[in-house]
């Protein structure tokens, strides 16, 4: 079964989660997006504001319980199955309730058939100091790959700087962005979807590079794509991902490996690297790198990717099988 990629949007009550999700859905970039909204109360307000938007192929509301502990396992599994089977989404976005600890929630989503892409935590600039003092509020920040310090226009500069330092101390791994009304380029935060890569992966004769802007000019975010029909050594490739420069905030793609007909999905987000087998073969490898001001870093990154390419026959099959018998995870 295809394990759809999921981005989890977390944050304390009123931090701006729904605003962020609506921004993504307003410009989905051609991806099929499905949404799960978890309301702790029985009244589904956030789900109603999302359902019906042009970017949503299907929305499922899980009201009346917290995703991390109270929503029944069978109910969650049914919701996920409905999305994956009926929509075949490129991306599933889960907006947790404000009181949800994303750690257990991510575990339950994986058990229900989803693959974690990233955790995005929203922090309100006015009230974030209080929220970080709550165990769940701190857990939300600690679990995040990206932290958005939202509504910075409503708090003083000194208070915002102080809160930003607290966030960095709580989670030095995460990328911190200050914003107003969740205005951050969605291409930086959300996966484009492995199915989009698979559909576009037509065989080519040699490695190619396709630079493009990932979205608005904010922060000079852009994406570069490396493609090759030659198989890739995944151990070397993992070492490259571990050593990506600070300007790279995410890298995602599919590898063609010599030891298997199946594609190998990789996802590197803020020093968290994961691999997972896909249930379909691929004709080429494709790596998408998203970051800021990549012009200086891209030649070295591209050369490192090329150095991972192999001839069609030979080295390392037994070592590969031992290392990649199951998905490998580095980091939190």
Image (spheres, rainbow, N blue to C red):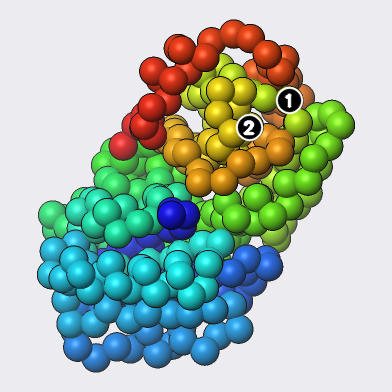
Residue 208 occupies which quadrant of the picture?
top right
Marks 1 and 2 close (CB-CB < 8 Å) = yes
Q: In which quarter of the image is the N terminus?
A: bottom left
Query: Could you tell whether 41 is left or right of 300 in the image?
Result: left
Q: In this view, does 127 lie above or below 211?
A: below
Q: Is residue 246 above or below residue 40?
A: above
Residue at the disc numbered 2:
256
Kindly identify the residue that appears in the image at 39 percent across and 74 percent down.
82
Query: In this view of the protein, can residue 245 be seen by the observer?
Result: no
- Mark 1 is surrounded, within 10 Å at the Cα level, by few (under 14), some (14 to 19) or many (20 or more) other residues, namely many
The tag on residue 247 is none
| Label whose residue precedes the other's in the sequence (1 or 2) | 1
Identify the element where label 2 is drawn. strand
Kindly identify the residue that appears in the image at 47 percent across and 54 percent down.
2
Q: Nearer the viewer, residue 323 or 251?
A: 323
Residue 28 occupies which quadrant of the picture?
bottom right
Query: Could you tell whether 312 is left or right of 210 in the image?
Result: left
Kindly identify the residue that appears in the image at 13 percent across and 64 percent down.
69
Q: Quadrant of the C terminus?
A: top left
Q: Which of 131 and 206 is in front in this view?
A: 206
Residue at the disc numbered 1:
230
Query: In this view of the protein, can residue 308 be seen by the observer?
Result: yes
On the image, the x and y values in percent for residue 11 come to: 30, 63
């Amino acid at each position: 079964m295809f394990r759809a990629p999921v981005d989890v949007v977390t944050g304390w009550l009123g931090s701006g989660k729904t605003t962020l999700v609506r921004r993504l859905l307003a410009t989905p970039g051609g991806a099929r997006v499905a949404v799960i909204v978890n309301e702790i109360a029985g009244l589904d307000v956030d789900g109603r504001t999302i359902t019906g938007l042009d970017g949503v192929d299907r929305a499922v509301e899980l009201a009346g319980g917290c995703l991390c502990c109270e929503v029944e396992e069978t109910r969650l599994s049914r919701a996920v199955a409905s999305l994956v089977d009926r929509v075949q989404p490129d991306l599933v976005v889960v907006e947790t309730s404000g009181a949800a600890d994303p750690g257990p929630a991510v575990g339950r989503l994986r058990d229900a058939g989803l693959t974690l892409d990233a955790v995005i935590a929203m922090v309100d600039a006015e009230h974030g100091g209080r929220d970080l003092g709550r165990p769940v509020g701190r857990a939300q920040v600690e679990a995040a790959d990206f932290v958005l310090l939202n509504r910075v226009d409503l708090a003083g500069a000194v208070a915002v700087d102080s809160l930003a330092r607290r966030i960095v101390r709580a989670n030095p791994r995460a990328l911190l962005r200050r914003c107003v009304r969740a205005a951050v380029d969605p291409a930086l935060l959300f996966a484009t979807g492995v199915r989009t890569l698979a559909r576009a992966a037509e065989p080519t004769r040699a490695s190619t590079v396709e630079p493009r802007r990932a979205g608005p000019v904010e922060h000079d975010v852009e994406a570069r794509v490396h493609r090759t029909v030659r198989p890739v050594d995944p151990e070397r490739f993992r070492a490259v991902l571990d050593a990506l420069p600070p300007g790279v905030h995410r890298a995602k793609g599919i590898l063609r490996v010599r030891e298997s007909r199946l594609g190998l999905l990789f996802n590197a987000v803020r020093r968290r690297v994961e691999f997972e087998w896909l249930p379909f073969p691929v004709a080429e490898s494709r790596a998408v790198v998203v970051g800021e001001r990549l012009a200086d870093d891209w030649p070295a990154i591209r050369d490192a990717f090329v150095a991972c390419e192999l001839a069609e026959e030979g080295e390392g099959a037994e070592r590969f099988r031992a290392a990649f018998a199951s998905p490998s995870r580095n980091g939190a």
